[in-house]
Image (cartoon, grey):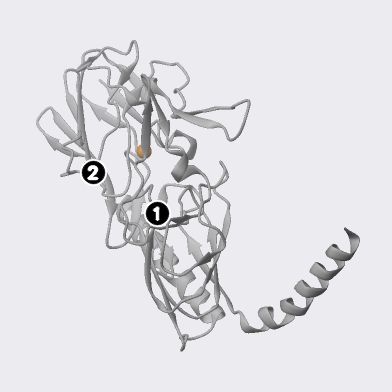
Amino acid sequence: MAWLTYLLSAFLASLMPRHAAATTKWTVIVGGATADTSIYANAFFPQTVTIGVGDTVAWAFEGFHNVAFLSGAAAPPFAVPEGDKTYWNPQMLFPAGGPSYDGAGYHTSGLPGPDGRLSYTLTFTKAGRYRYECTIHPGMRGTVIVTDKPIGTPAAALKRGRAEQAATLAAGRARFAGLAVERHGTSFVVPLVGDSRQRYSVLRFTREPLVVPLGATVTWAMRDTFELHTVTFTSGEEPPRFVVPEPQPNGAPKVLLNPKALTPTAVTRYDGTGYVNSGLLFPPGNPGKLPSSFSLTFTQPGRFEYWCLVHADVGQRGVVVVK
Ligand SMILES: [Cu+2]
């Protein structure tokens, strides 16, 4: 077999230099966050990149997203049921579609590990205008235009991407700085905000502990199109994990969506004891009419900590002080 190996490597070597010389590599940043993780960019930077036929795009991940070229098909569903359990769709978790794209088929990066780091590379073999998205954050979209006449250089495109990212994070920071709880008598509204045009989400509840009088009702209201959140009071327990990896004897692990995190507890009054969970809260006006707000009435004085179970790992934690 040695001769075959020799022939193959000689053949590949003859191809490589020419190929490498003709290919330009462009970088697109995926997401990003402020150092304190309070602001999360739900965007690709730059949003549009115009490259040459045969060029490569490398997506550099800075957050928990994916890159998915759907080629006109519907996005795979986020969750798949299996018996009475719900798993994260493996079509979303793992890479698919191979290293090149000609405008057809499902190509995806899969998801990064817990550190949010991943690099995904795709070579574009055919001229066209290709939209892609993150299937985790609805509305997070980018475009690759493949043409005989690329615009600018990879360095200029990356610089533009960094500037777009900085503008998005600055807009999010300003929004968080001005974030206020609304009060109507003994009713309080905590808005969960994001901005689909400026492409950020705020992954915090309130800037300071929310102080309310005994008997007050607090409503957490989704005003973000990108994210899902929960409002979960654990009464001193560790918050349950949102996802639980289940190693498999053969093949890739499965990722269970923890029923304790998904399932609402149907509790409307809280005295500082027990487990109270909103279940998943969805963007307002979502087509499935899934819940987008959660209300709780406080019946005992005290200082009560709560969590978003989806974003507990990036510090989405709040405090209600009842006096
Ligand atoms: Cu959250």
Q: Nearer the viewer, residue 319 or 109?
A: 109
Which numbered disc covers residue 239?
none
The part of the image, by quadrant, that contains residue 253 is top right
Q: Residue at x 49, y 51 (%)?
A: 63
Q: How many marks?
A: 2
Residue at 45% in and 44% down: 91
Q: Nearer the viewer, residue 23 or 261?
A: 23
Q: Is 322 above or below relative to 317?
A: above
Is residue 40 visible in the rendered structure shown here?
yes
Tell me if mark 1 has few (under 14), some (14-19) or many (20+) residues whose alpha carbon lies within 10 angstroms of its own: many
Task: Identify the residue at image location x=41%, y=68%.
Answer: 103
* Quarter, ligand 1: top left
Is residue 294 toward the left or the right of residue 165 in the image? left
Q: What's the amino acid at mark 1?
A: Cys
- State the quadrant of the N terminus: bottom right
The image position of residue 131, as x and y in percent, is: 36, 66
* x and y percentages locating residue 314 in the rendered image: 47, 40
Work out how far the residue at label 2 is from the one at label 1, CA to CA, in angstroms. 16 Å
Say which element carries label 1: loop
Q: Earlier in the sequence, mark 2 or mark 1?
A: 1
Q: 177 or 189, which lies in front?
A: 189
Give the residue at mark 2.
283
Q: Secondary structure at mark 2?
A: loop
Task: Please name which of the two marks, 2 or 1, marks the residue nearer to the observer.
Answer: 1
- The residue at the far bottom in this view is 149
Quadrant of image for the C terminus: top left
Image spot of residue 233 (x, y percent): 34, 21
- Residue topped by disc 1: 134
